[in-house]
Image (cartoon, grey):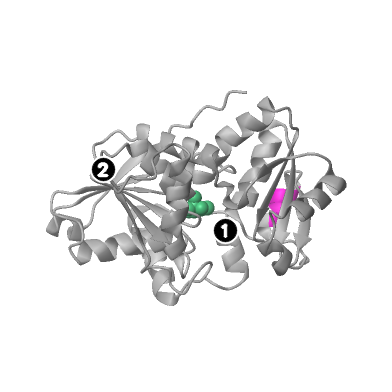
Amino acid sequence: MIIKNPTTPLTEIFDPLFEKRQIRFFIKREDLTDEFISGNKFYKLKYNLIEAEKLGFNTLLTFGGAYSNHIHATAAAGKKYGFNTIGIIRGEEQFPLNPTLSSARANGMKIEYIDRKSYRNKYDESLIQTFKEKFGDFYLIPEGGSNHLAIKGCAEIISSITTDFSFICSACGTGGTLAGLILGLDSKSFALGFSVLKGGSFLNQNVRTLLAYYQKERLNNFQINLDYHFGGYAKTSNVLNRFCKAFEEQHNIPIEPIYTGKMFFGIYDLINNNFFPPNSTIVAIHTGGLQGLQGLKERNMI
Ligand SMILES: *Cc1c(COP(=O)(O)O)cnc(C)c1O
């Protein structure tokens, strides 16, 4: 199987603030990878799909919350590349299905719910065995898609960036994408992650563990900022919602408050506070996630 990387634009963003601080700011539009296999999830899935085919699997099983971008993308990738897909969803079944899960189901994903306690122990051998009895054999992709094959895919984002830069930024959920970017950088510049989780201090270790597969766990050209989670995963606020709307109006680039909005808010705030030295060039990865907007609207969160 050959999966070609899409060509996505690198867009410079202008703002009087950047001029004042002598910063250049670019956005790598990975939200434009594919309408359905969007953002970083494309790169995280790429080598997992290739590996699954190589090992002779025709079914993928993975895990996520009910609004998960990863679940949405895995279902679409399964349909496009010819795999059956099974999504193990945290929590109770809800009817009607939310927009994320109805899209997943429309792409052929079988959806199975497990309670929150079982979800916390989702990789237990006994639970995996019950899934095997129920669904047959499968290639397992971890929650959020983060394994060493995912970071190999995310590393490729770097080589497609056609400008020199001093900082690369990404929102962090598991840290898999940031680990991939660090791997791709090979020490040439600094990677800055923005935790979208409250209590994201474990992310540093996650990133190092993922890098260890490639003997790169000693790299120190990265940092994960923990200050812009806005209350935690899937939380937003009026301030953040207003920021996302204004950003889209001004730059004509849609963002959402669960991942990319938190990162962009953080970058602006850090620029304001002189975190980046003058003459820095910053590239922020737009990791997608826009499918989540529909679910946020439905829940009156934006
Ligand atoms: C999943 C996701 C992330 C987080 O990626 P990790 O590799 O888990 O850190 C960031 N942004 C968006 C839009 C996502 O969907």
Give the extent of the magenta segment: 101-105
Neighbor class of circle 2 (other Cα within 10 Å; few <14, some 14-19, many 20+) is: some
Which residue corresponds to the image point at 69% horizontal and 61% vertical from the top-left?
A: 121
Circle 2 is placed at which residue position? 189
Is the residue marked 1 within 8 Å of ligand 1, measured from its CB?
yes
Circle 1 is placed at which residue position? 292
Which residue corresponds to the image point at 66% horizontal and 63% vertical from the top-left?
A: 120
Indicate the position of residue 183 as horizontal and vertical percent values. Answer: 39, 39
Residue farthest right in this picture = 133
Q: Nearer the viewer, residue 277 or 10?
A: 277
**Residue 160 is at least partly visible in this image:** no
Q: Determine whether, in the image, residue 42 is placed left or right of residue 269.
A: right
Q: Determine whether, in the image, residue 287 is placed left or right of residue 12.
A: right
Which quarter of the picture shows residue 100? bottom right
Which residue corresponds to the image point at 26% horizontal and 43% vertical from the top-left?
A: 189
Indicate the position of residue 30 as horizontal and vertical percent values. Answer: 44, 43
Foreground label between 1 and 2: 2
Q: Nearer the viewer, residue 128 or 51?
A: 128
Q: What is the secondary structure assignment of the residue under circle 2?
A: loop
Q: 11 above or below 270?
A: above
Which quarter of the picture shows residue 102? bottom right
Q: CA distance from mark 1 to mark 2?
A: 31 Å
**Residue 120 is at least partly visible in this image:** yes
| Magenta span main SS | helix
The quarter in which the N terminus is drawn is: top right
Residue type at numbered disc 1: Gly
